[in-house]
Structures are given as structure tokens and as C-alpha cells.
Amino acid sequence: MRQFSFLNLKAIGGQIAALVIASILVLHTIFTAIFLTHRPDQQHPSPGHMHGEFVTSAQLIAATRAPDRPRLLGDLARAFPELGIGMLPQEAVPDANQPLDLSLRAMRPHLGAGYRLFSLPVDQGQVRAGIVLPDGSAVAANIGSEFGGGAFWASPFMTSLIFAVVCVTLLGLWAARALAKPLSTFARAAESFSLDGAAPALPERGPEEVRALAKALNRMRQRITSLIDDRTKMLAAISHDLRTPITRMRLRSEFIEDETNRSRMLADLDQMLLMLESVLSFLRNDHRMESFTLADIASTLQLVTDQFADMGHAVSYAGPAHVMAVVRPDDLRRGVTNLVENAVRFGADVTVALTLAAERMTIDVIDDGPGISDARKAAMLEPFVRGDDARNMDEQEGFGLGLSIARAIALAHGGELSLHDRNPHGLVVRMAIPLRLHRGRRAA
């Protein structure tokens, strides 16, 4: 029955209801214990009440005949045992010029004419005061403890309040953690989700709603992974099946007598094979990233520049000689290679620069080519998008996947890829990656 669903302790609503009930029971138990410990009907009066009792007792004694005062003092001692009231010898009465304590000045207006109030030395932690009656006799009593500030903090009210605040705070923190922890787990799982299966599945525990959500997310991840695998397998099969007719066409092209037409036909067939391989490589890159490992980033970049320099391109490296960091070295080398390939295609002089910041390393591939217009920069990062007229490639080169693959590699490292203009002309492709430095030397 849905109207009683809040009684289900496996659901979030039931756990919140149980938390509220538990809080009420705990607080009620605490208040009951404090009430039984500090019985109001057995408590000694506060210092303010003791002042009033002393003033009233002194006025009663003053209105009583001397022979009847001993009996009255006995009755007052039984009625107010905390006062310790008694007659004071005349020799113990201080001089009238003695200054009055501040705590006793509030009693003076209630005594009336003919009475004189004075302070006495503290006796066993009790503050004592005396009153000279109109007939000249004196009476003394205790009017409170020596440390008056502790009464409020030690009162049942403050004790109950402190226990209530502590209990409610602890229960609230527990409830917040219990409800927020699954959401934090989902957020981390979404951030670490990858198609290579490296991220573990979401734990299916907690309230029913949380378990149902975890199951749904795990099934969604499985469907996404299966969809990408099916797409890759389908394109791999298409690529495999296309190789056979392309091979037959190459054989038949050899019998074309016109050498110009034969060369063009073979070039078109080679471009078709290269296109198939590039597409498959891009798709596999989505979910077949390698694991992180310690590598020398500077040496990796120098290796890439040396390879292009050996092929006759003007490519140089600028940056520290050694930088040890935790990366995916093969993927990083592949991404930088794609960027340098694009750069040497459009520029004559290319520089690969490595810079380090507090928590980030930046790899800039700088060329002196025609650059990319601002309107096309965002689109150029998408797959299968070629450059504009100023930076266009001919039909024999590229399929618009180099920047997309490099961007996917940067994102897999938790970084980003961006395009910037170079003055006076050229393009700067910047790969910014969070720096996971080795604990050894940072840079040489």
C-alpha cells in the first residue's frame, strides 16, 4: 500500500522517517534522564531566591518578640536549611562605613527603613551576609555559592540544550552522509566512465531508490559499450569486405594501357584503403586507451620531432630536457604526431613547445601556416571536418580525423585541446593536460 510506503526501511522515505522517530526518542530519553537527575521539586533555590528568603526571614525576626525568636529561628532553619540563618553577636557586626558588596545592593530596597545590610567573609565557599534589625540585633545567613557563574551553565536547561544540539547534529551528519554518499559515487563513476571497461561497475547497495538507479546506470553503461562495440565490428567487417573488391580493382587497373589513368585509378584505390583504416583507427581510439604509466614527456616529444626532422621537415623542440609524469605515453605520442602532421602539411617551420605550470603541462604545436579562422575553430575539432579555404587540403591528403583523435587523447588524460592564432600568421594547437608528476625530479 503506497500510503504506508514510508514504513519501508529499505527506501529513502522510510529511512528518513526512522531517523526522525529515532531523534525524537533519543531526545525524549535525554530529557527524561535530566529531569530525573535534576528534580525541580528537590532543587535548592537559586541565589536570587535566597536573597528574598533572607530578607523575608529578617523582617519576620524583627517583628517577633525577643523571647519567641529562638523558636522562629528553628522554624526558619527547617524551612530554609540552605540559608543557615542565625543570630549574629554584636562584636561580629562590622562597621557601618564598610562598603557593601555589589551582589547585595539589590536587597537593600526590599528591607525598608531601620535595617542595615552588610557583607561577611565567605565561609566554606558560601557567600554570607548580615542584616542589622531596627532593635540593634543582627542576623546572618548564606545567600549563595562563591562562584555564581556556574549555576547557569550547570542548570538542567543548558544540559538539555547541549545534549539536544549534539544529538541532532550527529544524526543530521549521519543522514546527510548516508544520502549524499551514493550521489557522490555516481558523480565519480560518471567522470571515470570509459568504454574500455577499466572503470568498475557502480555498487548496487543502499536504499531501494539508490540501488534501482545504480542498476539502471550499469545497464546503460553496458548498452553504450555494446553499441560502440557493434558499431566498430560492423565497420571492421565493412572494411574487410571492401578490401577484396578494392584488391580486384587494383589488379584490373594494371591492365589499363593509359599510364596517366592507371596512376589516377591506383591513387584513388589507395586513398580508399587509407580512409577505411583511418576511420577504424578513430573508432577504436574511443575505447581502447592504454593504461597510465610513468614516462619522460620531454623525451617523447623530442622523439616525435626527430622523426619528422629525419623526413626533411623543419620541426624543432623547445622545453625542458626531462619531465617525468604519469601519462598514457603511446596515446600521447600518437596525438602529438597527428598535430605535427597537420602542422608540417600547412607550415614550413614547426615548433613543439612544452611548458609546465603548478598543476598542468601544456604542449603547443606551433606552425607558420595560413591558420584557421575563428568561425571554423570549434568545427575543426569535430571528426571528418577539413579546414577552410585558407587551410584546405587536396583530395589525396587527410580525412579530418587528426585533430579529433588528438582531442580525444587529451580528454582521456583529463585535459583539453584548443586552437589559437599565432602572430603574425600561423596556428597554435594547445594540448593542456593535468600534471601528474613523479615524486622524483620534476624537470632538468
Image (spheres, grey):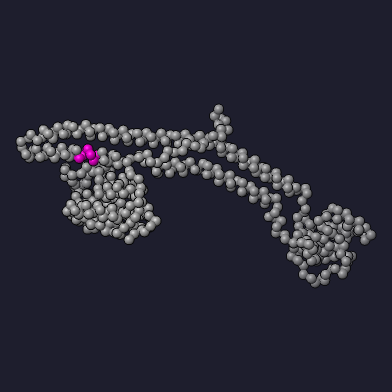
Query: Is 31 placed left or right of 245 in the picture?
Result: right
Picture coordinates of residue 95, whole percent (x, y): 82, 71
Quadrant of the frame with the C terminus:
bottom left
Picture coordinates of residue 348, whole percent (x, y): 18, 54
Q: Residue at x 23, y 51 (%)?
A: 340
- Looking at the rendering, the stretch of residues picked out in magenta corresponds to 274-279
As rendered, which of 221 and 383 lies closer to the eye? 221
Picture coordinates of residue 115, whole percent (x, y): 84, 64
Q: Residue furthest right?
A: 67
Label the magenta part by its dominant secondary structure. helix
Query: Is 394 placed left or right of 111 in the picture?
Result: left
Q: Quadrant of residue 28?
A: top right
Q: Is residue 178 magenta?
A: no
Query: Is 387 placed left or right of 297 in the picture?
Result: left
As rendered, which of 215 and 11 lies closer to the eye? 215
Picture coordinates of residue 225, whole percent (x, y): 35, 36
Q: Is residue 357 above or below residue 387?
A: below
Residue 433 shows in the view: no
Q: Quadrant of residue 188?
A: top left
Quadrant of the frame with the N terminus:
top right
